[in-house]
Image (cartoon, rainbow, N blue to C red):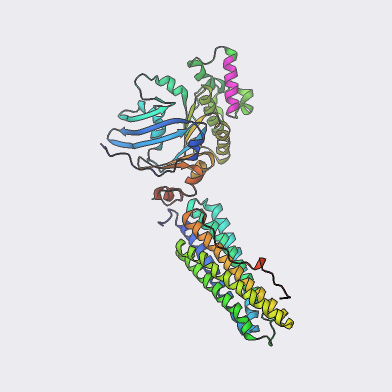
Amino acid sequence: MSDHTVKSYDDDLANLKQLLAQMGGLAEEQLANAIDAVTKRDIRLADRVIAGDEKIDALEQQIEEKSILTIARRQPMAQDLRQIIVAIRISADLERIGDLAKNTAKRTHAISEQMPRKLVSGLTRMGNLALEQLKNILDAYAQGDADKAIQVWRSDEDIDALYNSIFRELLTYMMEDPRMIGPCTHLLFGTKNMERIGDHTTNIAENIYFLVHGKAITEERPKKDSTSTTNYNLNT
Amino acid sequence: MDASPQRPVATTSPRILAARETKIVASDVNVYYGDKHAIKHLSIDIPDRAVSAFIGPSGCGKSTFLRSINRMNDTIDGCRVTGEILVDGKNIYDRDLDVVQLRARVGMVFQKPNPFPKSIFENVAYGPRIHGIAKSKTDLEEIVVNSLKKASLFEEVKDRLAHPGTGLSGGQQQRLCIARAIAVNPEIILMDEPCSALDPIASARIEELIDEIRQNYCIIIVTHSMQQAARVSQLTAFFHLGDLVEFGDTDDMFTTPKDKRTQDYITGRFG
């Protein structure tokens, strides 16, 4: 894209994009640490993640303020306007991703030492998939690559499928040993958090597509999360 | 002379054209000022009872085209127009067409308010009188009052209709000029940057006025303010170097323009 006649307008937009990249980097780091903390039951790392969420929140606010100021000052049109609106939306998704990472880290405290390690492996796998999705979508945003965004959007299916199988697995453990219900519930919530993060990355993907093409993705995203209709008969 | 065929224009068939009668059909219009080819092979349909905005950088031909719709260009030496401009199916460049009658049907409002050096009343009464529209004195008074009301100026000037029009503020003068244009019952109103000499509040009043009267007229506005075009019009046409680059529904033009030149212009990237 060629430059604006008014140079400082370019600076405003570049600045916004840079803030968002910074926020994305932080969210990625928080998520990676949260997964690590739960996997290794590292309480100190978990506390660092919990404390670190503030920085993401502050960045979101900063992006919002800059966006409003730029709209007021420049009356942006067409793709400039989309860039700003999309920055606001993506920052909201990143903020939620930060919250979910923090919430997952918090659960490190609740998972007891006695719990078999292999139980956590499902959450770890989910987490790594979600982290991969987040990385890819942030790359797609940085490069303005709508095709890459669509790829991420489609592969959310994999996260949903994995979530279903972990959901069933954890239910089975709980049925076998009621003492596991507490920790397993925390794991279930943690896993659900990762599934939610996957959903936020698809939101971001939709926004990148809108940014590039000026219209919404028309195709239906395959939804594979069936846990809300799964029931388990205890008598079988 | 440029004899190249019509250039492709980026457009999807505008929804506003489907929703309204078409008032003006221009086909392969060329305007020359001596050797300068000011409008190149322009074809466009303009809807009735709606506002169409012409935008583009200075010298792009938008005012030139606007002026060819009521044959104002006839008065310029060395200006030549080819092609067809149909208003209600009738070519306004036909030899047998009465230009005076045409200009009664196609009113115009200019960049700088230009009231006659006469009273407010006379400014509005002049047109209906010379065109023989008013049958009696009371008839004429009624036309003047109604026109001033339509131009939302009446309340401000009703006690001083005999005062000179030039004594009004810039914004009031511009509304007086709109009242003067409306007084002869035109079908089309051409506005050439009607707000560029006005402050924001006076501009807003003109925009409000345009919005109120657009149900009854075919309005074409040339403006340098993209925001104004986006606010007041339903159809937008973007001109560049004598070419009609793109036209379409205003809602699309300012959010998802098709042509890169349009995009660059409306986002402030044009050199």
Outermost residue toward the front in this view: A236
Residue at x-position 54% and y-position 30%: B173
Q: Position of residue B50 (x, y in %)?
A: 52, 34
Q: Is residue A23 above or below residue B74?
A: below
Q: Quadrant of residue B8?
A: top left
Q: Residue at x 68, y 76 (%)?
A: A171
Which segment is the magenta one?
B139-151
Vertical order, A9 against A35 (above or below): above
Residue A1 position within the rendered picture, expressed as x and y whole percent measured from the top left: 41, 57
Would residue B87 be visible to someone looking at this image?
A: yes
Task: Measuring from the top left, give residue A81's x and y in whole percent.
Answer: 51, 53
> Residue farthest to the bottom?
A114
Query: Is residue B216 in the magenta section?
Result: no
Q: Determine the image quadrant of residue B168.
A: top right
Judge from the rendering whether residue A68 lies leftward or rightward of residue B102; answer left or right: right
Q: Would residue A106 be visible to someone looking at this image?
A: no
Q: Position of residue B214 (x, y in %)?
A: 54, 32
Residue, far top = B136
Work out whether B47 lies above or below A213: above
A199 or B50: nearer the viewer: A199
Q: Which of the two residues, A19 or A28, is positioned nearer the viewer here?
A: A28
Is residue B150 rendered magenta in the image? yes
